[in-house]
Structure formats: structure tokens, C-alpha cells
Image: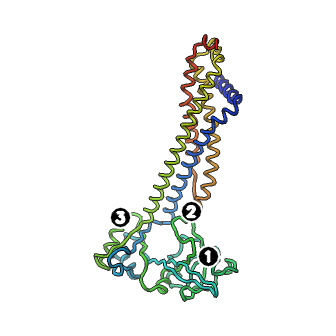
């Protein structure tokens, strides 16, 4: 242990004597470790947040809508009553089947009016109303003429009023008077909602009265033990019985969307990690080059050590410790840079994906593994070369 501490002190002295050279050599390690650590941490945090949001909010919803490209789209048009028929036919396969709307409308408040979008909601569990409250089951049951407004739409319709004063006011939606009960913001997992612009949310039972000419799509909530493919086939089979066998419907599972997003994140992460890996290889070559220069500069020192009894293993250990220390310091600085990048990026991702949790233990392990590995791998050749020097020839140099 005493000998290792002595070698460690000598390695620090050697690096300190050539500060600029050491710093330039570390740059590759700093960039490579920062890239690998930050990409690994951010990608895992994002995918974990998506999975958590999916599990917490039960977003495994199958959306079913008529294919607009079919020969007779009117025959496939969905009706409000289709939701009840499909729900009865599916039985325990589905938790619920809801008629869904997303329509353009004119919102008006006195002289202020804007073309916006309205979407149906079922007891808006995925949204937060502040100020005000969300749509609840009683609103849905009664078909209440109430709505939630996005902050953007509220500011356009009530430009000179605070958001608190907007709650409780009324507005016209395509000539229908509705009461504003809250200003909504999308909760965790905002990535899975497109209701971020000029949008109003109304109970789907209320939307039926405002837009009686059919619905836009069916939202099918499968039971937890039912595969998406099975529920898809069952829903289409029921719709064919209702509207005819030639009708064509498009289905889209939000779980599939999430899996595609995770796949894209994984591909991007793999590409960026590969670039970071190239930086690490370049850093390793730089460390090897500097260590070879160090061997050349310290040839006489090596000769003296061997002349007074140092073994080849001692020389190898000395130079390996120096190369590993150089790599570890660069890796540590790269890890700090990577952590800073992760903290900043995860905060931004949190607004989209929901709560992100960075796997710090895994990130630290990866940074330490690469730092030690690069130093040992690329420090072996210079160390072995130093140990093979003939002591007489080394002293003569």
C-alpha cells in the first residue's frame, strides 16, 4: 500500500509538472465521458418518465375513427350511440368506451372572438385547473354547459382580466352559452396531449348537444389483461356489424405511440453514445501518445530505477497508475459536466414527459468504468515499453 501511495504521489507530480499538456490530454476524456454519461442518463430518465406516466394515467387508450380515404366515408361515420353498443359487445374486455369530439368552433366574449378547438372530456383526470376546478362526473352525468379554457384561449377572450376573474364568467361557443369553471393546464405527461393551444374542454355529454351530427372517434379503454390487438379486432368487428362489412376504420393505440417514441429516443441515444465512444477512443490514443512521450523524457529515470533493483512490474505499475490517474481526472471532470447537462435537460424534459428520475448510480458507474478502462487499456503499451528498456542503454541516454 505504501508503494502504491508513493507511485500515486509521483504520478501527481508528473502531471503537475506538465499542467498544460495534461489538461489538453484530458479534454478528450472530458468530452467523451460527458457525452456518454449525459446521453445515458437523459435517455433513461425520459423513457422511465414515459413508462411511469403510462402506468399512472392509464393512457393505454385505443382511438378508433373512420378512414377518410375509403369509398363511402359517410357509411362509416360514427354515431353517439355506437359507444354504448361497442361497450356492451366488448363486455369485460374494456373498462369503458367513450364518444369523443374534437371540433373547430368560434369562441366569443363580447367584441373578442377567436376560432379555436373544442375537445370532449371525461372527468378530466389528466388536467389541472388553476384557478377553478376540473370537469367532474356530475358535469358529465348532467351534460352541464360548462367548460375549461386553456390559458392561451382565456387571455385572448379576456385580454384585460386576470385568470382568476375569468372563472365563473360565460362565453359563447358557436352561439351556445357555457360557463367557464376553470383554466386548465396539462398535467404530467403533457407529451400525450395535443390540447396545449387555443382549446376548450367540455363534457362529452355536453358536446353531444352542441354537435349532434356524429362523433369524431371512439376512445376505448381496454382492461389491463387484454391485448391491444384483441381489443382492436373486437371493436372493428362490432363496427362492421353496425355500419356494414365494407366500412374501414383506423385504429391508433397510445401505447404504441409511446413505444415508438421510446424507440426513437433509444436510436438517438445509441447514436450520440457512439459519438461519445469515438471521443473516448480518441482520448485514449491521446493518453497513449502522452505516456509514450513521458517514457521518452524519463528514460534516464527508468534506467536508474532498474539499476537500483526495480522490477519490470514496478515500472509497469508506475506508468499504469499515471495513465489511469490522467484518465480518472478527465473522467471526473467529464462526469461533472455531464451531470450539469443532465440536470438542465431533465428539467426541460420534465415539462413534456412528466417527472424525470436520473439513474445517478448507473451514471456514476459508467463514468468510473470508462475512465478506469481507458486509462488501463491505453496505458498498457507505454508501461510495457518502459519496463523493457535496457538499464544500461537507458542510463547512457
Q: Nearer the viewer, residue 326 or 354?
A: 326
Q: Is residue 267 above or below residue 98?
A: above
Residue toward you, 321 or 51: 321
| Secondary structure beneath label 3 | helix
Reading the chain from its start, which is encountered first: label 2 or label 3?
3
How many tags in the picture? Answer: 3
Asked if disc 3 and disc 1 are in contact, CB closer than 8 Å, the reply is no
Mark in the foreground, 2 or 1: 2
x and y, in percent, of residue 272 in the image: 52, 48
Q: Is residue 242 left or right of residue 30?
A: left
Q: Quadrant of the C terminus?
A: top right
Label 2: how many Cα within 10 Å (few below 14, some 14–19, many 20+): many
Residue 199 figure quarter: bottom right
The alpha-carbon separation of the residues under discs 3 and 1 comes to 37 Å
The disc, 3 or 1, on the residue closer to the chain's N-terminal end is: 1
Residue 229: which disc?
3
Q: Is residue 179 left or right of residue 207?
A: right
Residue position marked by numbered label 2 in the rendering:
352
Q: Earlier in the sequence, mark 2 or mark 1?
A: 1
**Mark 2 or 3, closer to the camera:** 2
The answer to whether residue 361 is visible is no
Q: Quadrant of residue 286?
A: top right
Give the residue number, with chain letter if any, for mark 1: 183
Label pair 2/3, CB-CB below 8 angstroms: no
SS state under label 1: strand
State the separation of the CA atoms marked 2 and 1. Answer: 19 Å
Q: x%, y% of residue 183? A: 61, 76
Q: Secondary structure at mark 2?
A: helix
What residue appears at the point 65 percent right and 41 percent down from the top-left corner?
Answer: 333
Amino acid at each position: 500500500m505504501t508503494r502504491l501511495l508513493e507511485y500515486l504521489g509521483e504520478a501527481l507530480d508528473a502531471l503537475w509538472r506538465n499542467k498544460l499538456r495534461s489538461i489538453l490530454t484530458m479534454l478528450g476524456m472530458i468530452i467523451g465521458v460527458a457525452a456518454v454519461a449525459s446521453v445515458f442518463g437523459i435517455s433513461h430518465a425520459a423513457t422511465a418518465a414515459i413508462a411511469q406516466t403510462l402506468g399512472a394515467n392509464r393512457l393505454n387508450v385505443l382511438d378508433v375513427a373512420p378512414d377518410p380515404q375509403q369509398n363511402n366515408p359517410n357509411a362509416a361515420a360514427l354515431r353517439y350511440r355506437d359507444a354504448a353498443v361497442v361497450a356492451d359487445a366488448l363486455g369485460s374486455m374494456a373498462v369503458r368506451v367513450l364518444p369523443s369530439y374534437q371540433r373547430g368552433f368560434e369562441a366569443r366574449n363580447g367584441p373578442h372572438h377567436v376560432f379555436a378547438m373544442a375537445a370532449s372530456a371525461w372527468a378530466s383526470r389528466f388536467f389541472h385547473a388553476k384557478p377553478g376546478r376540473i370537469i367532474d362526473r356530475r358535469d358529465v352525468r348532467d351534460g352541464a354547459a360548462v367548460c375549461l379554457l386553456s390559458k392561451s384561449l382565456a387571455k385572448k377572450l379576456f385580454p384585460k382580466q386576470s385568470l382568476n376573474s375569468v372563472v365563473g364568467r360565460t362565453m359563447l361557443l358557436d352561439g351556445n352559452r357555457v360557463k367557464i369553471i376553470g383554466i386548465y393546464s396539462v398535467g404530467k405527461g403533457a407529451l400525450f396531449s395535443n390540447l396545449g393551444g387555443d382549446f376548450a374542454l367540455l363534457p362529452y355529454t355536453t358536446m353531444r348537444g352542441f354537435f349532434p351530427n356524429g362523433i369524431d372517434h371512439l376512445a376505448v379503454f381496454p382492461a389491463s389483461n387484454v391485448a391491444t390487438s384483441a381489443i382492436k379486432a373486437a371493436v372493428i368487428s362490432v363496427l362492421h356489424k353496425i355500419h356494414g362489412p365494407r366500412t374501414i376504420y383506423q385504429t391508433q393505440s397510445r401505447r404504441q405511440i409511446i413505444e415508438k417514441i421510446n424507440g426513437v429516443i433509444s436510436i438517438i441515444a445509441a447514436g450520440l453514445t457512439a459519438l461519445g465512444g469515438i471521443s473516448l477512443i480518441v482520448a485514449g490514443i491521446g493518453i497513449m501518445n502522452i505516456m509514450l512521450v513521458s517514457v521518452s523524457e524519463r528514460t534516464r529515470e527508468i534506467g536508474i530505477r532498474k539499476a537500483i533493483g526495480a522490477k519490470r512490474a514496478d515500472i509497469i505499475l508506475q506508468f499504469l497508475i499515471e495513465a489511469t490517474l490522467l484518465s480518472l481526472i478527465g473522467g471526473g471532470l467529464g462526469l461533472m459536466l455531464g451531470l450539469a447537462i443532465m440536470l438542465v435537460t431533465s428539467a426541460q424534459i420534465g415539462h413534456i414527459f412528466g417527472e424525470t428520475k436520473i439513474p445517478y448510480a448507473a451514471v456514476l458507474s459508467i463514468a468510473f468504468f470508462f475512465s478506469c478502462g481507458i486509462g488501463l487499456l491505453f496505458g498498457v503499451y507505454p508501461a510495457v515499453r518502459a519496463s523493457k528498456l535496457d538499464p544500461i542503454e537507458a542510463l547512457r541516454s
